[in-house]
Image (cartoon, rainbow, N blue to C red):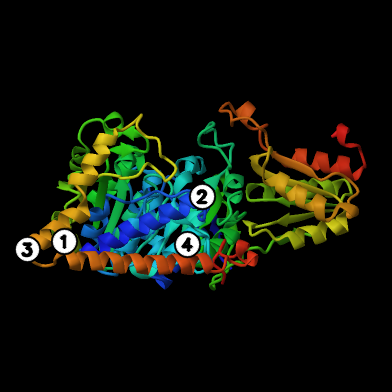
Amino acid sequence: MYTQMVKIRVFEDNANQLYLDAKMPGLTHMYSGEEAVAVGICEALRVTDKITSTHRGHGHCMAKGADFRQMFCELLGKVKGYCRGKGGSMHIADQTNGNLGANAIVGGSMGIATGSALRAKLQKSDDVTVCFFGDGATAQGLMYEVMNMAALWKLPVIYACENNGYSEYTSTDEIAAGEILERARAFGIKAFNVDGQDVIAVNKLASELVEKARKGKGPFFIELMTYRYHGHHVGDINRTYYRSKEEETEWKKNRDPIEILGTFLKTEGIANDDELRELYSKVRSEASEAVDYAINADYPDISEVDMHVFQEG
Amino acid sequence: MPEITLSQAVNQAIAEEMRRDETVFLIGEDVAEAGTPFKVTSGLVEEFSTERIIDTPISEPGFMGLAVGAAMTGSRPIVDLMFGDFLFLVMDQLCNQAAKIHYMSGGKLNVPLVLRTNLGATRRSAAQHSQSLHALVAHIPGLKVAMPSSAYEAKGLLKTAIRDDNPVVIFEDKLMYQDKAFVPEEEYCLPFGKAAILREGTDVTLIGTSSMRQVCEKAALLLEQDGISAEVIDPRTLVPLDENTILDSVKRTSRAIVVDEGHQNFGTTAEIAARISEKAFYFLDAPVIRMGAMDVPIPFSPVLEDITVPTAAVVAEKAKKIVAGELIHAL
């Protein structure tokens, strides 16, 4: 889990640099700071289990098994990317690992995740679907429609609300009335709150719920308290009007998910500083190799522009 | 060949495909025991149980979203959207999700689902239960659009839609559910992108979709009494559109009227008329005429509602004028 979290952090550092160096078209949304959420949950899943992701989706993608090269290629619009360069940062899908795709509509994938769970039930498959979304998406009506049906039909879906405290540029307190967990409970869905910076706690809870959902005891709802180190997107630099530098420093210094697990590993004698440093630098060199690969990779041939509008045959 | 209603034809198509392929299921409001308000799906739940004929809460975006997710992961859902007007409720799931997923994933993910809904005014249902919104859907790349004009087309096109690996929206005419037509006993599917020439003629081509096919056929009979020979074409699907059959016909007749029940502004009639004007311009002896629903919300009062939709008499009148060579401002 430590390696997976480091991979996400390093991936995002590189993606941010690609943006700053003007090597990446468009914008992207950094997952840094929230690694324990994606990793803690995805480590509880099998490859055949499904996830749906969000505009802030790189972490879910990596945690569900994606590789650096295809990810960076997609970010740069290259043909070797996961979507042949047609999706970009906000639409990476990796069906071989059960990732049904990131989604650039806030809350847009809640129906898809629940539908995947309905399919699993109809086809007597025991796979579980996890729907990742942010606190901002809890303001979308679709969520309540699909949670109602998921609860009525006992679907094997887990709604994972990454509460990073901000709905784009607005504090969650200003957009969410009442308690988010109570909304799920109103449908009779068992709902849990967990420290989203503690990957061990996340993984323990997720593992229990996934196994229960697999046996038809779902759906479940988890609210994971976490923090977004960067702005809403990479271009959101000046953000003191909505949150303080002190708050950011506090989370980065004292609540960093990688640091928390690192300290645990050292205290338990599972790894020492040198080993963790070595691991970090190995991941960094893998990432920079993949960035070079992506920078030098080909763009799609322009004849591909009207391919894949429809599935032929 | 037995004569059955459009409603029975749809019911047969769903049942046959569900027997053939166990990944097919039907989902929507009141589709099981109630059989929908139009009684189209009556009896299906007895054969397929509530596992595959799934009644939902009144949550159109919700069950549309479920269908997209189920389709992406190995099912072939048929979504029953009770009224075409409710398309506005499902737009994000249909147009931002279903339509784009295959493309955005670089061809890796498919969304083989069918959205069955309806169109058509003159049922005295007023502005929120009378719209014909197929042009909205046809505008979005990634969605196929089928427009059956009788029981025969309804069955054949629906079976093709269910087997298609893309999202297909199929619009049935509410007023036609009880209309009978001869339908073969043996199994058949009708190909998408293949228009039907329902009547051959030499003076003018009338292109009529869905509910407007019958209007065009009746107009052709009226014109015959005046010695005008009208060809009638039903495109059957808007996406893909069988442009060749339409263009070949217009090149022979040199005149065309496009009749469709959607609103005229920026609509289906405009698209087909533009293609004819672009691709058969030098064969034309008259401007291509568009005849859609009036650009007003559909009114309730019968005396108002009836004039919002093209009728055979009005179509025949326009056809006579262009055949007579009258100028456009006289139209």
Residue B134 is situated, as x and y percent measured from the top left of the image, at: 59, 47
Residue A155 seen by the camera: no
Q: Which residue is mark 2?
A: A26
Q: Amino acid at mark 4?
A: Glu
Residue B231 seen by the camera: yes
Name the disc covering residue A268, or none: 3
Q: What is the CA distance from the residue labelled 4 to the residue labelled 1?
A: 31 Å
Would you call the spot at circle 4 few (<14 residues within 10 Å), some (14-19), or many (20 or more)? Answer: many
The residue under the point 58% across, 45% down is B136
Marks 4 and 3 in Cβ contact (< 8 Å): no
Q: What is the CA distance from the residue labelled 3 to the residue labelled 2?
A: 43 Å
Q: Which residue is mark 4?
A: A74
Q: Amino acid at mark 2?
A: Gly
Q: Which residue is mark 1?
A: A207
Which element carries disc 4, helix, strand or loop?
helix
- Picture mark count: 4
The chain letter for the residue carrying disc 4 is A
